[in-house]
Image: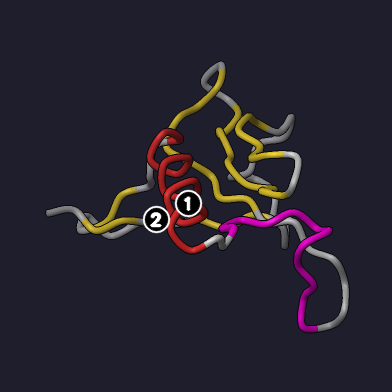
Amino acid sequence: MLSSEYKEPKAIEMVIAAFTQYARHEERLYMDGKSMTSLVGKSVTTYSRCEELVGDQYRVVVGGFGSGGLYCGYFCHNLDDRASESFGVVVSRKF
């Protein structure tokens, strides 16, 4: 559970942050497996879950940013109930 000082981002905030970072620095946030390798040498695709739910069940995720674009959608399992190395949570501080 997040502290009341922080919040999960909305999907639109994640998309804007990813594209702004790329436009300014040519650096992809939340990369696809073709662009990034983990410390143990495996390819890793990164996603961050967002505040929104699809059908009150599935979390919206943003990530997999590669040469083909940025993925924004949902996965067909409940991320709250499943631990996965591919998913994380980005938080922002409330002001």
What is the three-letter code of the residue carrying label 2? Met
Q: Quadrant of residue 39?
A: bottom right
Residue name at image x 45 percent, y 56 percent: 21
Residue name at image x 56 percent, y 62 percent: 27
Left or right for 93, reference 42: left
Mark 2 residue element: loop
Q: Position of residue 75 (x, y in %)?
A: 71, 33
Looking at the rendered structure, which numbered label has been put on residue 36?
none
Label 2, on which residue?
Answer: 1
Residue name at image x 42 percent, y 49 percent: 20
Left or right for 67, reference 5: right
Left or right for 81, reference 55: right
**Upstream in the sequence, badge 2 or badge 1?**
2
Q: Position of residue 15 (x, y in %)?
A: 48, 40
- Residue 55 vs 79, above or below: the answer is above
User: What is the C-alpha distance between the residues marked 2 and 1?
Assistant: 33 Å
Q: Which stretch is magenta?
A: 28-39
Mark 1 residue element: helix
- Residue 92 vs 81, above or below: the answer is below
Q: Quarter holding the N terminus?
A: bottom left
- Residue 93 vs 56, above or below: the answer is below
Residue name at image x 55 percent, y 21 percent: 54
The residue mark sitting in front, 2 or 1, is: 1
Q: Position of residue 25 (x, y in %)?
A: 48, 63
**The one of 12 and 57 positioned closer to us in this rendering:** 12
Label 1, on which residue?
Answer: 23
